[in-house]
Image (cartoon, coloured by chain):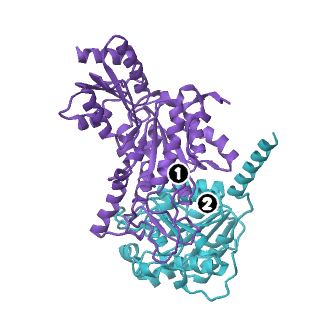
């Protein structure tokens, strides 16, 4: 998937739409770090931005596509993977990246996630997990930690929490990874590996929502939140990828799953080419 | 050489789409439209196209829009409950002006209703199913050959005007098998969407052009444009500026008014001297056609006005036909509780009496029922 290897040092202004600045993210929001890591990884891999298609859903994460100097599609809530599936099948020459959030990807869009994992079409899905519906005012999401306060869990969250990576791996994703925004270099390298992967790659980025989630739960400012996220992770050093369906106390980071499996687009094109050859011979 | 064959309405939709250059189909199984998907799964690979059965109705609509945003002509097909599920993404295609064709084979409703029985209950949903004001085209074939030719026209209108087009069949037309010669049906496969050309500098993806159809930036062509379902400025980026917001929505609706001659299509039969005009679509129009024939044989001056383009309704055409014939009454037979009749009443207020004939029991309206009602009205 490398178009050319970058010789120049990474400059973020080469990859964002400066005219769209200032961005609308809150001070302290981790999403900007994830965006920077994506663009940096793209630069390192030498991906041509004319050939990059970024498809996003709805929510704070959904707004990031507008800031990227590429072919960008801000779609409907929960559906970016469905749009991206059509785009990637119709245009296998494009690098397709989906940017989504925990609510967008795991709640309203959950069905599309598991089937995208199963299908293994060539694209990268970046799920920015800030444990909250930030844009709509801080409602509980499928990844909100236990007992946390949100505007729809005024007495604390009593619902169990999804482990998105366990879900993606169980559904057949051929590349699954997780990183926190505190570890910028590791996040960039992991994103690059996901982009390079031939097939469906899923990346969970642990992001922080300081203004809404942090404030409501007295989690401190952004640095405190990021440090606490980092300390609740452990770099992955074990062979097993999925131990329990719900989130344990210490989450693994790094590449959690990587398997060689037929990429769906190529498999489909091979099948149809065979059919055409057969019908021509007849 | 004649290529006459027996063909089903649903299959005709698939073949028409391929003839018009459709190369992507995403769908989900649902009665009574599944044959469209089955036909596409078999035929698209032969022409280098892509078929995918998605995980649900919502995803199939999303995938179709995604493929079309990539520059490929794309279609889906569904029925009743599936059409309801597609509405949000259909609205995205309306707002962002993404060409796509949706075949909706109507069945009894509401909800799961009567999946294998015919109905015409989605006439208003086809026009107003997604939220907010929006422009959309709905075509209503009344035969297998028309299912073919109107699907070709649907692809072409959608591509040339950047608007979603619904092909609205009822279950009878969808499952009807008729003998057709597809080679003899004219169909233009050359309609190419206007893609952006020229320098990227200063390019605006939603600029106001003379024909009100902005050329579409294709990924990979160097424009690196932004597409969103949010109300957008000519730049493609979201805006809440009142003047820009109003202009954006107005252009998409004015676009269809500007191109009305190209969009509107209707058929008339025995209208010139008619005392009573029947206005009907789909299988109800087929029954009406037979009723008119039988009534004329008895000396009753009945005529048929059949909108092939259902939305935007060919309103001037209907008013002209009514004025020229001097008809004193209009009858609207339809398989619902009265949807098309509302539009006809709106158009003919103070011009003539408008009567309804409705059936909602899962059976098609018969020519006898229509003929009897016509004679009652004229008595």
For image coordinates 44% across by 78% down, the residue present is A29
Eye-nearest disc, 2 or 1: 2
For image coordinates 27% across by 36% down, the residue present is B319
Q: Nearer the viewer, residue B158 or B295?
A: B295
Apparent side of residue A243 relative to residue B197 in the rendered image (left or right): right
Mark yes or no: residue A137 visible: yes
Q: Nearer the viewer, residue A204 or B345?
A: B345
Q: In the figure, A142 relative to B280: above or below?
A: below
* Res B35 quadrant in image: top right
Number of numbered tags placed on the structure image: 2
Chain at tag 1 = B
* Res A85 quadrant in image: bottom right
**Pointers 2 and 1 in contact (CB under 8 A)?**
no
* Res A189 quadrant in image: bottom right
Apparent side of residue B45 relative to residue A141 in the rendered image (left or right): right
Instruction: Farthest residue to the right: give it.
Output: A281
Q: Residues within 10 Å of mark 1 (few under 14, many from 20)?
A: many
Q: Label 2: which residue?
A: A88
Which shade is chain B? purple
For image coordinates 52% across by 51% down, the residue present is B59
Chain at tag 2 = A
Instruction: Farthest residue to the left: give it.
Output: B350
Mark yes or no: residue B34 visible: no
Q: Label 1: which residue?
A: B59
Which shade is chain A? cyan
Q: In the figure, B29 relative to B253: above or below?
A: above
For image coordinates 63% across by 27% down, the residue present is B4
Please provide percent x and percent y for residue A33: 51, 80
Numbered disc 2: secondary structure: helix
């Amino acid at each position: 998937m490398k178009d050319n290897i970058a010789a120049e040092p990474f400059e973020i202004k080469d990859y964002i739409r400066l005219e769209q600045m200032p961005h609308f993210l809150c001070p302290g929001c981790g999403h900007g770090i994830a965006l920077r890591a994506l663009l940096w990884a793209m630069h390192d891999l030498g991906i041509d931005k004319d050939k990059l298609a970024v498809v996003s859903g709805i929510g704070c994460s959904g707004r990031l596509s507008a800031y990227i100097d590429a072919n960008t599609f801000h779609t409907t809530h929960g559906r970016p993977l469905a749009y991206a599936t059509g785009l990637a099948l119709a245009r296998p020459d494009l690098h397709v990246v989906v940017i989504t959030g925990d609510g967008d990807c795991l709640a309203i869009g959950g069905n599309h996630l598991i089937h995208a994992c199963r299908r293994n079409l060539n694209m990268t899905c970046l799920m920015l997990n800030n444990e909250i519906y930030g844009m709509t005012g801080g409602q509980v999401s499928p990844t909100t930690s236990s007992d946390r306060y949100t505007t729809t869990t005024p007495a604390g969250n009593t619902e169990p929490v999804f482990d998105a990576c366990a879900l993606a791996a169980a559904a057949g994703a051929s590349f699954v990874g997780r990183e926190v925004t505190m570890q910028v270099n590791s996040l960039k390298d992991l994103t690059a590996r996901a982009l390079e992967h031939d097939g469906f790659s899923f990346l969970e980025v642990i992001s922080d929502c300081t203004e809404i989630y942090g404030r409501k739960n007295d989690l401190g400012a952004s640095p405190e939140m990021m440090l606490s996220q980092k300390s609740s992770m452990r770099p992955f050093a074990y062979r097993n990828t999925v131990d329990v369906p719900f989130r344990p106390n210490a989450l693994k980071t790094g590449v959690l799953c990587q398997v060689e499996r037929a990429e769906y687009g190529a498999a489909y094109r091979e099948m149809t080419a065979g059919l055409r050859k057969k019908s021509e011979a007849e | 050489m004649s290529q006459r064959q027996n063909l089903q309405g649903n299959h005709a939709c698939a073949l028409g789409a391929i003839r018009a250059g459709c190369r992507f189909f995403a769908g989900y199984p649902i009665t009574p439209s599944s044959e469209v998907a089955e036909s596409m799964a078999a035929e698209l690979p032969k022409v280098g196209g892509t078929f995918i059965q998605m995980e649900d109705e919502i995803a199939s609509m999303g995938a179709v829009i995604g493929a079309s945003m990539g520059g490929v002509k794309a279609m889906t097909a569904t029925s009743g409950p599936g059409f309801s599920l597609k509405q949000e993404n259909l609205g995205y295609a309306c707002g962002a002006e993404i060409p796509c064709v949706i075949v909706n084979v109507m069945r009894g409703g509401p909800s799961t209703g009567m999946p294998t029985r015919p109905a015409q209950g989605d006439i208003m949903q086809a026009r107003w199913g997604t939220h907010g004001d929006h422009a959309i085209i709905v075509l209503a074939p009344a035969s297998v050959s028309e299912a073919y030719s109107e699907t070709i026209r649907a692809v072409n209108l959608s591509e040339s005007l950047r608007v979603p087009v619904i092909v609205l069949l009822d279950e009878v037309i969808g499952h009807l098998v008729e003998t057709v010669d597809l080679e003899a049906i004219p169909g233009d496969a050359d309609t190419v969407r206007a893609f952006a050309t020229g320098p990227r500098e200063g390019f605006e993806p939603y600029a106001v052009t003379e024909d009100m159809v902005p050329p579409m930036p294709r990924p990979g062509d160097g424009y690196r444009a932004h597409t969103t379902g949010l109300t957008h400025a000519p730049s493609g980026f979201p805006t809440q500026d009142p003047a820009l917001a109003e202009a954006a929505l107005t252009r998409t609706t004015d676009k269809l008014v500007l191109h009305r001659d190209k969009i509107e299509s209707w058929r008339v039969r025995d209208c010139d001297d008619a005392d009573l005009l029947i206005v009907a679509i789909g299988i109800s129009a087929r029954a009406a056609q037979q009723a008119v024939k039988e009534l004329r044989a008895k000396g009753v001056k009945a005529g048929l006005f059949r909108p092939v383009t259902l939305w935007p309704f060919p309103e001037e055409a209907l008013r002209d036909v009514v004025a020229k014939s001097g008809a004193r009454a209009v009858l609207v037979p339809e398989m619902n509780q009265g949807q098309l009749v509302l539009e006809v009443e709106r158009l003919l207020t103070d011009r003539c009496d408008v009567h309804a004939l409705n059936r909602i029991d899962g059976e098609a309206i018969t020519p006898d029922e229509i003929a009897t009602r016509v004679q009652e009205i004229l008595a």
